[in-house]
Image (cartoon, rainbow, N blue to C red):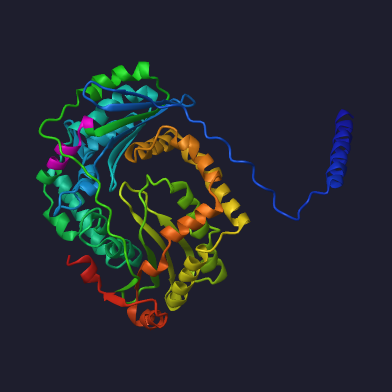
Amino acid sequence: MTRFFQHVAMMAFIGAAGITLAAQKPDRSAPPRPAAPPALKLPPAQKSALSNGLAVWIIEQHEVPLVQVNLIVRAGSAADPAGTYGVARMTANMLDEGAGGKSALELADAVEFLGAELTTLSTFDYSAIRLSTPVAGLADALPLLRDVIASPAFPAEELERLRKERLTELLQARDDPATIIEIAFPRFVFGEKHRFGTVPGGGAADVKAMTLDDLRAFHRGFYRPENSVLLLVGDVTPAAVLPLLEQTLGRWKPGGPAAKATAPPSAPQLTRRQLYLVDKPGAAQSQIRIGWVGVPRSTPDYPTVQVLNTILGGSFTSRLNTNLRETHGYSYGAFSGFEARISPGAFFAGAGVQTDKTAEALKEFFNEFDSILRPIPADELDKARNYVALGFPAQFETNADLARKLEEQVVHSLPDDYFPSYIRAVVQVSGAGIEKAAQQYIQPERFAVVVVGDRKMIEAGIRALNLGPINVVTIDQLLGPM
């Protein structure tokens, strides 16, 4: 009986709620407007230094008993000695292939036993070692990190294994238009004598000539405490962790003279449009990249160009993707972006498109470049600002996310209040600011246009567009002999 009355009461409540909702008659004539972007509140970075000069930044995050430890070395592929390109990347790859008297397998086992994860990497601007570990294992994990940083073994057999892997990658690249375009586009934008115009990991000749002495010299010159910053984000306090850091990483005292890494000079800007057709017979698709030299990450225009790029090709609903994917069906996805580097990287737009629609796709790219130079409708600008501003806090969700943003702050010398004030800067981007940035950074008459595809299928259509002179390039001319 009791359950019966409970059921009756529940049905009456649902009925009343239904009447109330029906009476409200929601307005479906327009989509709901997004809420105002929330303020980004970040805990402050507490900065100090160890006795050997290693700078330490600590951010306390006590929600979970984990800590992310990232060590940044201010030297990456841009610091490769001329004639030995790829040394920075290979040095980073070799750090955990044996260190501190442990083999690669022994080191991996020790890290795994702690429930930790250790990775190494090198970009054009910097190299890094990232350690994620439970706080309970930090005291045991830090000596492993120190060994990887300070005393890698550089075993000859591991270099030979990684050398073969890299040469295999380069061999496979010759058959992959998507990889070929990533090599070809910067070559034609920056030139083969600029570091950004060459392959970060080195070409076949570089990899074959690389020696253990090259790696040791790069490590000895650049992997130094005074050239590094240690970032800790997680369930730690400076009082508890600094003595532990001093006992481990404070003993890192490399010998020999230090080297100095300098950012590559800005590449000369392109002055006229040039087309490059890289012939890949039998290619299933044509790969397209269009652009020129862009801006450094530190530019004051960064919030503006991010909103501009969101409209052009930086989101799924961008103009390029809507045009080439949704409207015409030429591509699975079209995009654009600005490379974030210390020296100006590239502005690029691109897509993989149907071979028989290559010329049509190029025409639509230039239609969108011309369109972005005209005033942006207010609703489209508002949507793009919200997209950038509302999505920004998601980049700080985890310890690893926050540590990576700190890497960005350190490498590009961003002020301490940069990220908390970024959303406000995005919201304040104006239509006039967007128009000025587009006129400055989107100049299609001066872009390099690079297409990798089957020449006999696509050349006639491209020439009919009269976009400019076409330079035909073979795979061997681009990649060199193996």
**Where residue 106 sits: x, y (%)?**
23, 34
Magenta segment includes 459? no
**Where residue 88 sits: x, y (%)?**
21, 46
Residue nearest the viewer, comparing 136 with 40: 40
242 is higher (above) or lower (below) than 365:
above
Q: Is residue 48 visible?
A: yes
Most prominent secondary structure in the magenta stretch?
helix
Question: In percent of the image, x 43 and y 61: which residue is there?
Answer: 442
Question: In percent of the image, x 47 and y 59: which residue is there?
Answer: 438
Q: Which residues are magenta?
A: 216-226
Residue nearest the viewer, comparing 28 with 432: 432
The number of numbered badges drawn on the structure is 0
Q: Quadrant where the C terminus lies?
A: bottom left
Question: In percent of the image, x 48 and y 30: which residue is there?
Answer: 42
Is 402 left or right of 129, judged from the image as shown?
right
Magenta segment includes 220? yes
Q: Quadrant where the N terminus lies?
A: top right
Is 366 left or right of 468, judged from the image as shown?
right
* Occupied quadrant, residue 235: top left
**Where residue 92 sits: x, y (%)?**
23, 43
460 is higher (above) or lower (below) than 215:
below
Q: Is residue 314 visible?
A: no
Is 62 left or right of 260, judged from the image as shown?
right
